Image: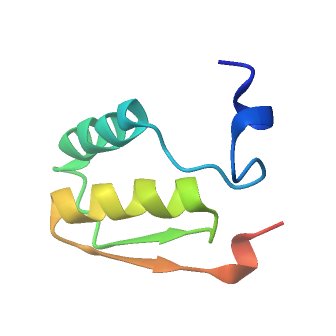
Amino acid sequence: DLTWVGNSPYPHDPPLSKEGLSQARDLAKRLRYENISCIVTSPFTRAVQTAKAIAEELGIKYVVEPAFAE
């Protein structure tokens, strides 16, 4: 949907859609055997939501690193 920017209350930091959250959980299932102990993410909403969903699924922690913002 290319009109999301004009319709979004947060056009520069949009949240994940329901589909995006589902994809993050699916990704966690694929990463389950990769021996990941922590996720480091940028502070942008979508990145944090993705990291959180994966971390919850894997039972690991995630850390927001402000320096990863542009």
Residue at the (35%, 42%) spot, across then down: 21
Q: Nearer the viewer, residue 34 or 18?
A: 18
* Residue 3 shown left or right of residue 14 in the figure: right
Residue at image location 64% in from the left, 63% down from the top: 44
- Of 42 and 13, the residue lying toward us: 13
Q: Is residue 3 above or below residue 30?
A: above
Expressed as whole percent of the image width and height from the top left, the position of residue 13 reads: 69, 55
Q: Is residue 25 left or right of residue 52?
A: left
How many numbered badges does the structure rendering display?
0
Vertical position of residue 43 compared to residue 49: above or below: below
In the picture shown, does residue 34 fall above or below 17? Answer: below
In the image, residue 44 above or below residue 24: below
Q: Residue at x 70, y 53 (%)?
A: 10
Q: Residue 17's image quarter?
A: top left
Give the quarter of the image for residue 23: top left
Task: Tell me which corner region of the image, top left, top right, bottom left or bottom right, holds residue 61.
Answer: bottom left
- Which quadrant is the N terminus positioned in? top right
Front in this rendered view, residue 57 or 11:
11
Q: Residue at x 57, y 61 (%)?
A: 45
Query: Residue 46, how many percent across, how many down?
Result: 55, 53
Residue 28 x/y as whole percent: 25, 47
Which residue in the rendered view is the most extreme toward the top? 1
| Residue 48 position within the rendered picture, expressed as x and y whole percent measured from the top left | 49, 64
Q: How is the image coloured?
A: rainbow
Please state, as top left, top right, bottom left or bottom right, where the C terminus lies in the image. bottom right
